[in-house]
Structure formats: structure tokens, C-alpha cells
Amino acid sequence: MQNKISISNLNFFYGKAQALYDITLDIPEKEVVAFIGPSGCGKSTFLRTLNRMNDTIPIARADGTVTIDGENIYAPGTDVVALRRKVGMVFQKSNPFPKSIFENVAYGIRINGIHSSKSDLNHRVEKALHDAALWDEVKDRLSSSAFGLSGGQQQRLCIARALAVEPEVILMDEPASALDPIATQKIEELVVELKRDYTIVIVTHNMQQASRVSDKTAFFMLGKLIEFGPTYKMFQNPDEKLTEDYITGRFG
Amino acid sequence: MDHRIIDEQLDVLRDKILLLGGATEAAVQRAMKSLVERDNELAKVVLEEDKIIDQMELEIDRLSIDILALQHPAAHDLRFVISVAKITPILERIADHAGSIAEAALTINTEPLVKNYVDFPLMAQIAAEMLRTALDAFTNEDAQISREVIKRDKEIDAAYKRVFNKLLDMMIEDPSATTGAAHLLFVAKHLERIGDYVKDICELNVYLREAAFIKHSREI
């Protein structure tokens, strides 16, 4: 499998405080990679370095390289807006706009000028909602407020919104942590479905979720990448004692 | 975390399989003793205690499933539960073979003594040693010793062939010994099968320790 994202010797700082230490990691194309680790281990920070979401924090600074399709996204002159279109993101808490279901998905298509006509826009919105496994539940109320949807539906709407601008990579930061088991299962099924077309990186505190959906798992602790490997191996026979201690609940 | 909820259950599971292992080992030894020493009472004890072994198997099955369903073990914990769940029915089958030897003893003991048990004591000794060492290797999670035990299965197979040929010769030479010798053939087969089962246990010991599957592999 070809690598979609290659991270090399990445160090990350919030002011003087170092949050990530010398991370080197390859993320294969059209696979799901899960980041696990205790709170504060840097996994979300690391996720946000992959589409430069940390740029919004004034004191944040990254050293090292992150290449996507061979291009260093930290190189001067990188078009960050284009980067974030290519590398979409879904957050822990669903954050639909205070608009209709249709407009939530259409927004990104419009501002990026992706559509060629009104019917093309409609088609793209419908496709994104289909791909996010939400279409059948909302097709009769597209003009209703997005806030009328359940938590799980709102999260899938956010995924549809991310898909609508035709990204290649989707970053998910604990996308199901606030959802009930049924809504969580739908998100997990969606993740597995989406990897046919997208490269997915998911941060999760839920060990079973990581083992269910991901092809590879990275375990972080105190800003360091402790172990990265095939998920089946990480959960059956990890190389590092720290990994074993974490996934078997030996950490307090 | 010093103590996890799963630890308590894993400890109980470990205790239970060690008890089952001990009971199985005792069953094999007593069955052979009942045969060699023509001790019908001891043979009956083996048959009676087989019910207890069956019960132990069920308890381990239930506990293993509970741990898998409720504690979601991973890594070494997972391999331990899987190994226990797979070793348990093997031990129960070994005990069944011990029971079959005890049943054979009850029959053979009414027949005239078949002289020259030849390699029987050797077969029984190898089987018992293999079983004891395999159970110790499970307790100590010793893959190296487990591999050595696997190699010993050839010794038991070779002894079985010698016993088989010797018993056939006996039947031809002395037709009056045919019934007793025929039963002994079955006993020899039971011991040979016990060797195979011990080999299976050792393969699981290697899995427990190394997460490696050596079953059906030329490399051990």
C-alpha cells in the first residue's frame, strides 16, 4: 500500500512546552489508522498537525516534515485552505452550522466553487449525504434545521459536510465519544465503508473502537510515539511493554 | 494500576486449569497403575473422578466466556484466556483416555496375566512425564521446554509401534492371550493419543508465550 502521509522527525511546541517528540510515521493510502493513548499524550495535537489546524494557535510551532502525496505541507507558500479541503476534519462534538441540513452540506461546495450548476450542487449534496449514510434519514427534510437531528445524525452530517468538498484524507477526533452505542456503531460502520475511497486517521479513547475499525494503530504517551503497527498485532502481541500495559488497563 | 478487575478472574481461571491439569495427570497415572498392578478399585476411582473432571471443564468454559464477554481482554490477557479455553477440552479428552484405560483394566484384570508388557511401562512413563512437563511449562509460560516436549512425541510413537508389533506376535504365538492382548492394543493407542494431545497443549503454550502459531507447521 502506498503511503498517503509521511511524517518525519516531527517535534511540536506550545510556546516552550514540547507536546510531540520526534514523531516519524507513515500513513498508508485508503487505510484507517487509529491514534490511541492516555489523555494529554499528544494524539489530538498530532492529528491537528496533519492539516495544520494548530496554525490557529499563535504560540504553536512545528519542526520536521509532514508530506502528503510527497509534498511537505509545512513548506513556505503552502495553500492552507487547499490543504484543509484535501484533509478534512470531524471533531468530537458535532458542530453543524445554524442552517438547514442541505445548507450545511452545500456550504463547503459553494465556497470552494466546486459545483457547476444548481443541479450539480443538489447532486453533490445528495451524494455526500449518501456517503455519510444519512440520506435515507433526512431526504424528506433537507430544508429543516440541522439542530433538529439527533447527536449521531448531526455527527454524520458533519462527516457529509467534510465529504462534500471531495477530500482525500479525513481526520476524526473522537468522533463517537459523545454518542450512544447504536449511533457509535453507525459511525464505525461508516469509517470502514469510507476507507474504500479515503485515507482515515481517527483519534479514539475507546480501545475496542480502535481494534474494530482500524488497520493500523499508533500508541502515544507523553508526546512520544511508543509503538505503531498492524492493529491485530497491537491488540494481540504488542512489542512494547508500555503498549501492553495501556491496552490491558494497567495504567492508572 | 496495581490491581485490575480482570486480574481476579484471571487468577481464578489459572487456579482452575491447574487443578484440572493435576486431576488429569492423576487420572492417567492411576489408570496405568490399575492396569499394571491389576487394581480394580483404583480403576473404578478413575472412572468415578472423570465426572468431576467434566464438571471442571464446564466451569472453565463458563469463566473463559465470561471474561471474553465482559472484560474484553487484550494482548497477553487475551492469549491466556484463549489458551486456557483451548487447553481445557484437551485435558478433558486426556482424562477420557485415562478413563478408557481404566475400563480396559477392569476387563483385562479378569483375563490371565499377559506377560511381557514390554514397552508399556515406558510408554506410560513418557506420557506421564510429557503431561507433567507440559503443565509445568504452561504455568511458567516456558516456550522452550514446550518445544522440547513436542519433540518427545516421537518417542511415544516409536514405543507404540514396538508395543503394537509385540502384541501381534503374542496373539499369533498364544491364541489364549488374544483377548487380553487386544485390549492392551487399545490401551497402547490411548497412550499414543495422550502423547498427541500433550503436543497440542505445548503448541498452545508457545502461542501463549510468543503469540506464534506452530500447529501444522514444520518449524517448531
Image: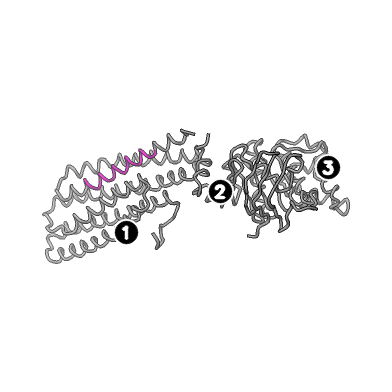
| SS of the residue under disc 3 | helix
- Cα gap from disc 2 to disc 1, whole angstroms: 36 Å
Tell us which disc is closer to us: 2 or 3. 2
Looking at marks 2 and 3 on the same chain, the residue that comes earlier in the sequence is marked by 3
Q: Quadrant of residue B57?
A: top left
- Cα gap from disc 1 to disc 3, whole angstroms: 70 Å
Q: Horizontally, is B174 left or right of A12 in the view? A: left
Residue beneath disc 1: B151
Q: Position of residue A158 (x, y in %)?
A: 75, 42
- What's the magenta region? B13-30
- Cα gap from disc 2 to disc 3, whole angstroms: 42 Å
| Kind of residue at disc 2 | Glu
Q: Horizontally, is A148 left or right of A248 in the view? A: right
Q: Which mark is residue A229?
A: none
Tell us which disc is closer to us: 2 or 1. 2
Q: Which mark is residue A103?
A: 3
Reply above or below: A105 against A2: above
Tell us which disc is closer to us: 1 or 3. 1
Q: Nearer the viewer, residue A29 or A79?
A: A79
Q: Quadrant of residue A5?
A: bottom right
Residue beneath disc 2: A227
Q: Horizontally, is B127 left or right of A63 in the view? A: left
**Where does the C terminus of chain B fall, quadrant-wise?**
bottom left
